[in-house]
Image: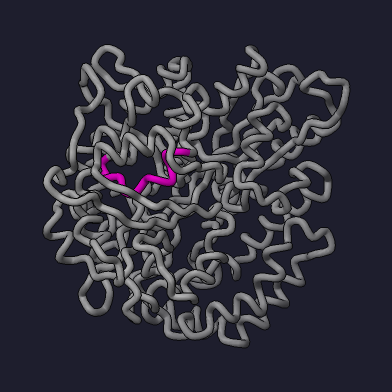
């Protein structure tokens, strides 16, 4: 059985019925989950519920999680109060910007003073797997059996892959749709003004960026428009497919189709990094790339009319159009089709394993049953509130269906920044719902663009470049040496390759040789020995 089929058996039904990097939810919260909320025929806001806690004490627990949007969450807001009232819960939320999360979480874990509920990478990461084995987290099997809505939110195959050696599950995954395109979006009105045709290849993209750099598309009398911006290297995951690269993944070895190698050892991946460096050197890539640590700096720059092109999650299209048209009613946002690479390689999308972090419950928590009772409520009686929020504040009812109010049109207490930190778990069937997405486009006043975006999604999904590595197969050498070897040899070179103008491919290759000799080759060999199935994974069929 292919690992993708084992992990996502329920996803076939999703594609049949519905045919996400997704980085925002249906409430424009900015989380890395694909979006979509099924339209529910309803004439009013959801009735108040007590989460089955009417005759029980208030559920209280602490919760630490990252935030993908600005870290502006303020406790005591109206949305929080309404949630606490309906769910009979009090949650002490602590947030950390996602860009700092892994670094700061290590300090918290080392101190041993864990919150009741903690976001983490999960058992596919050595650090978290070790903590599981050391007893830091609560085994949750009995609670999954007791609260079936929580268990049923996640496909059985994923629970199975996340199971520990002792047979217990500890980790509750945050699910994402495996096809989450990160296309190149651009100011179509500016391209038309400058006579630039939509690029079809990476070479044509470079030529377009050079025209923009030497022009004044916004008409302010200055050549100060940023040609291309992006928030992270991951934003370029689908552009990298034009080099045949599964970004941050493993691919077949060009020298031996029966072996797989990590992208760090794939020369096409190295070439892609230094192609990005060439853009940076020429002033075509944002000078703040990798230097500005504000999570949404690139999105904000494009939305403010300061940049012409951006690599960004496909679900951000509504936000971009609505924000830009507030500044300029004539603004138009286009989505480039997958670009062909330097040697003609067709672009597509880099699919992902359908889990992007998730959360653990501390073994020391005082009321684990209460936490699961609350999670179960969010998926049953409280499902409407979880998905839609408060009528007139986060959604309106139109023709008997709930239509989400765009984030920028909401009152401060009901914006995504106030909702995201209180979010936990969405069921797999909500991860891609075209009917609901169409309502979102219509609610934002751009319903005429829905078919266009859906068509672009299909173009990216047509050719998939997945990660060939099965991370449930653990390499002993990787567990023992992987982190140290990365830190000692590769990280200094790779992290600076794009923005260090003196860096070059030979330096990367030299670092790779040292990594390989120090144990990296042993890791590759063990992965290939232990992972007998090296066929291309399929996460959706």
Question: Which residue appears at 41% of the width and 68% of the height?
Answer: 114
Question: Which residue appears at 63% of the width and 81% of the height?
Answer: 515
Q: Quadrant of residue 432?
A: top left
Measured as percent of width and height from the top left, residue 333 is found at 60, 24
Magenta region includes residue 405: no
Left or right of 506, for residue 434? left
As drawn, 443 above or below 38: above
Measured as percent of width and height from the top left, residue 425 is found at 31, 48
As drawn, 531 above or below 536: below
Answer whether residue 433 is visible to the viewer in this image.
Answer: no
Q: Quadrant of residue 458?
A: top left
Answer whether residue 348 is visible to the viewer in this image.
Answer: yes
Name the foreground residue: 92 vs 311. Answer: 92
Exactly how many numbered labels are in the figure?
Answer: 0
Measured as percent of width and height from the top left, residue 192 is found at 70, 18
Question: Which residue appears at 75% of the width and 47% of the height?
Answer: 288
Magenta region includes residue 421: yes
As drawn, 389 above or below 173: above
**Image: magenta residue range:** 418-429
Question: Which residue appears at 43% of the width and 40% of the height?
Answer: 76
* Residue furthest bottom in the image: 518
As drawn, 273 above or below 191: below
Q: Quadrant of the N terminus?
A: bottom left
């Amino acid at each position: 059985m292919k690992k993708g089929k084992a992990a996502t058996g329920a996803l076939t039904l999703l594609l049949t019925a519905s045919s996400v990097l997704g980085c925002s939810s249906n409430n424009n919260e900015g989380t890395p989950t694909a979006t979509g909320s099924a339209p529910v025929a309803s004439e009013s806001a959801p009735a108040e519920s007590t989460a089955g806690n009417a005759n029980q004490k208030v559920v209280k627990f602490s919760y630490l999680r990252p935030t993908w949007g600005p870290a502006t969450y303020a406790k005591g807001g109206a949305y929080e109060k309404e949630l606490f009232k309906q769910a009979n819960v009090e949650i002490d939320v602590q947030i950390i910007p996602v860009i700092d999360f892994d670094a700061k979480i290590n300090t918290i874990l080392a101190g041993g003073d864990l919150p009741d509920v903690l976001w983490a990478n999960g058992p596919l990461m050595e650090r978290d797997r070790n903590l599981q084995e050391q007893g830091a987290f609560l085994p949750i099997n009995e609670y999954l059996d007791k609260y079936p809505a929580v268990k049923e939110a996640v496909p059985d195959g994923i629970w199975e892959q996340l199971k520990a050696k002792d047979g217990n599950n500890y980790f509750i995954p945050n699910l994402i749709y495996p096809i989450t395109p990160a296309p190149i979006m651009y100011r179509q009105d500016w391209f038309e003004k400058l006579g630039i045709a939509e690029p079809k290849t990476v070479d044509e993209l470079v030529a377009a960026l050079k025209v923009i750099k030497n022009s004044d598309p916004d008409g302010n009398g200055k050549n100060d428009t940023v040609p291309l911006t992006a928030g992270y290297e991951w934003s370029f995951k689908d552009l990298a497919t034009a080099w045949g690269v599964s970004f941050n993944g493993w691919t077949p070895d060009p020298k031996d189709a029966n072996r797989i190698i990590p992208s760090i050892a794939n020369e096409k991946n190295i070439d892609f990094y230094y192609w990005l460096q060439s853009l940076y050197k020429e002033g075509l890539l944002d000078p703040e790339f990798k230097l500005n640590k504000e999570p949404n700096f690139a999105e904000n720059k494009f939305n403010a009319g300061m940049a012409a092109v951006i690599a960004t999650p496909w679900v951000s299209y509504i936000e971009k159009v609505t924000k830009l048209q507030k500044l300029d009613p004539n603004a138009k946002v286009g989505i480039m089709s997958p670009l062909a690479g330097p040697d003609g390689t067709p672009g597509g999308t880099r699919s992902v394993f359908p889990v992007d972090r998730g959360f653990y419950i501390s073994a020391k928590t005082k009321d684990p049953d209460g936490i699961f009772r609350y999670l179960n409520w969010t998926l049953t009686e409280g499902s409407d509130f979880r998905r839609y929020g408060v009528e007139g504040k986060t959604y309106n009812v139109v023709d008997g269906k709930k239509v989400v109010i765009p984030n920028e049109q909401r009152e401060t207490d009901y914006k995504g920044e106030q909702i995201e930190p209180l979010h936990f778990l969405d069921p797999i069937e909500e991860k891609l719902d075209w009917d609901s997405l169409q309502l979102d486009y219509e609610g934002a006043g751009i319903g005429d663009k829905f078919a266009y975006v859906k068509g672009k999604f299909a173009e990216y999904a047509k050719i998939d470049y997945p990660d060939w590595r099965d991370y449930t197969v653990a390499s002993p050498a990787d567990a023992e040496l992987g982190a140290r070897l990365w830190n000692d040899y590769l990280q200094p070179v790779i992290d600076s390759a794009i923005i260090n103008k003196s860096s070059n491919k030979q330096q990367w290759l030299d670092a790779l040789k040292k990594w390989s000799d120090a144990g990296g080759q042993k890791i590759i060999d063990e992965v290939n020995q232990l992972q007998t199935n090296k066929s291309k994974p399929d996460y959706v069929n």
